[in-house]
Amino acid sequence: MRILRLGIGILLSLPVLSFVQSQTIPHYKFKFVEHRSLKIPEPSDIVYDSTTMHFFIVSDHGILLECDTIGNVIRKADKKGMDFEGVEVRGDDVYVSDETPREVYKYDRKTLKLEATYSVPLGGKLNKGFESITYNSTKNCFVLVSEKPAVIYEFDENFKVLGQYSFNDARDISSARWHQGKMYLLSDEDACIFKCDPRTYQPLEKYSVSILNPEGLCFDSHNNVYITSDDLERLYFFKNLPTQP
């Protein structure tokens, strides 16, 4: 796989690292075990909190909620946004990306009170901002991804941009999640999960999921997989990722 250095991006004055289409990678079919309807309008992302064994889910309506293990709402944050698209838990804080105003909100995990707001500028239409957020523990940086075209952006703890990578193996990216030393990218239009190298974001494996509009992705402490469907307002439950095609 060649690495091409392209021109200056809108967001920062660093070269885009663009990967040509990867060689053939293992491709698996991944079927869900069950699903449940959520009483959450347009759930756009989900993350697992290993401390409480609960989920945090965000909505396109600008709402952050804490839910139990089957998706029942326990509480929600007072501070609302415009179009929440990504959520991540890191230490005692919950981070949420708000697509329309190009902002990241930092909430106290215990109280769900807003602690800080970070501006993450990105050109384009209002609904073409960042679609997800996760923390890449391999490189010690936050990762936000623009949906289409799919571009991966790395940020420091103060959300100052560090670099960006163009991801050409999917038509779009709706969610990103670092888990056990790998980066996982979920494509809505391709209905699949890409397992990637967390340093280069080069795809290593691909998993097809038979879900309409898969928007959010996370793993629990037992490596079970959970995906939210935005349009259907459902939470899908999977077992571990398959190891056989």
Image (spheres, rainbow, N blue to C red):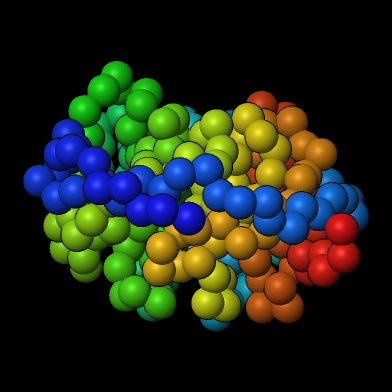
Q: Where residue 49 appears, x then y in whole percent?
A: 55, 70
Residue 26, quarter of the rendered image: bottom right
The one of 231 and 13 positioned closer to us in this rendering: 13
Q: Can residue 93 be seen in this view?
A: yes
The one of 48 and 145 positioned closer to us in this rendering: 145
Q: Quadrant of the C terminus?
A: bottom right
Q: Is residue 21 left or right of residue 95?
A: right
Q: Where residue 237 appears, x then y in whole percent?
A: 79, 55
Q: In this view, does 41 lie to the left or right of 212?
A: left
- The single residue placed furthest to the left in the displayed view is 13
The one of 209 and 77 positioned closer to us in this rendering: 209
What's the residue at 31%, 47% (across, down)? Answer: 4
What's the residue at 40%, 77% (across, down)? Answer: 138
Q: Is residue 43 visible?
A: no
Residue 52, quarter of the rendered image: bottom right
What's the residue at 36%, 53% (across, down)? Answer: 3
Q: Is residue 145 left or right of residue 215?
A: left
Residue 163, quarter of the rendered image: bottom left
Q: Is residue 196 left or right of residue 111?
A: right
